[in-house]
């Protein structure tokens, strides 16, 4: 799946557990989330992507200011 230009995957890892992975730039982020529904797991990954994109943008601004 793609969210805001970031490709990510969400796969079942056990009952109610979902493994996720995405890459922003050269950084690969992985983890697991607990959710009964796959749509909830996907939404949680999308929120994580939002946080990481914001963090990456702040780092770029800080680096360009030096």
Image (cartoon, rainbow, N blue to C red):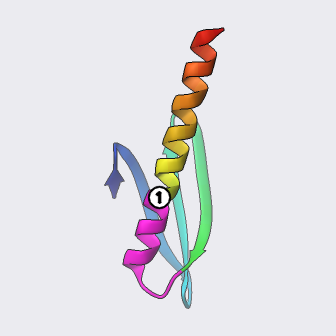
Tell me the residue that label 1 is attached to: 47
The residue depicted at 51 percent of the width and 30 percent of the height is 57
Provide the residue span drawn in magenta: 35-46
Residue at 34 percent of width and 42 percent of height: 5
Task: Tell me: residue 5, above or below residue 13.
Answer: above
Residue at the image position 42 percent from the left and 84 percent from the top: 37
Q: Is residue 66 magenta?
A: no
Expressed as whole percent of the image width and height from the top left, the position of residue 8 reads: 43, 56
**Left or right of residue 56: residue 46:** left
Q: Residue furthest right?
A: 66
Quadrant of the rendering where the C terminus is positioned: top right
Among the 4 quarters of the image, the one containing residue 43 = bottom left
Crowd class of label 1 (few under 14; some 14 to 19; many from 20; radius 10 Å): few
Asked if residue 6 is positioned above or below residue 32 in the image, the reply reads above
Q: Is residue 30 left or right of residue 45?
A: right
Q: How many numbered discs?
A: 1
Residue 7: percent from the left, percent from the top? 39, 50
Residue at 51% of width from left, 34% of height from top?
Answer: 25
| x and y percentages locating residue 44 in the rendered image | 48, 67
Quarter of the picture holding the N terminus: bottom left
Q: Residue furthest bottom?
A: 15
Taking depth in this image into account, of 53 and 25 the one nearest to the observer is: 53
x and y, in percent, of residue 64 in the image? 57, 12
Q: Secondary structure at mark 1?
A: helix
**10 over 17 or under it: above or below:** above
In the displayed structure, 45 sits above or below 19; it is above
Please, what is the dominant secondary structure of the magenta stretch? helix
Q: Is residue 42 magenta?
A: yes
């Amino acid at each position: 799946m793609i969210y805001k230009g970031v490709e990510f995957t969400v796969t079942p890892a056990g009952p109610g557990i979902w493994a996720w992975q995405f890459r922003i730039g050269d950084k690969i982020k992985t983890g697991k989330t607990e959710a009964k529904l796959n749509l909830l797991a996907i939404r949680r990954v999308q929120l994580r992507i939002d946080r990481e994109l914001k963090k990456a943008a702040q780092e770029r601004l800080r680096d360009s200011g030096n």
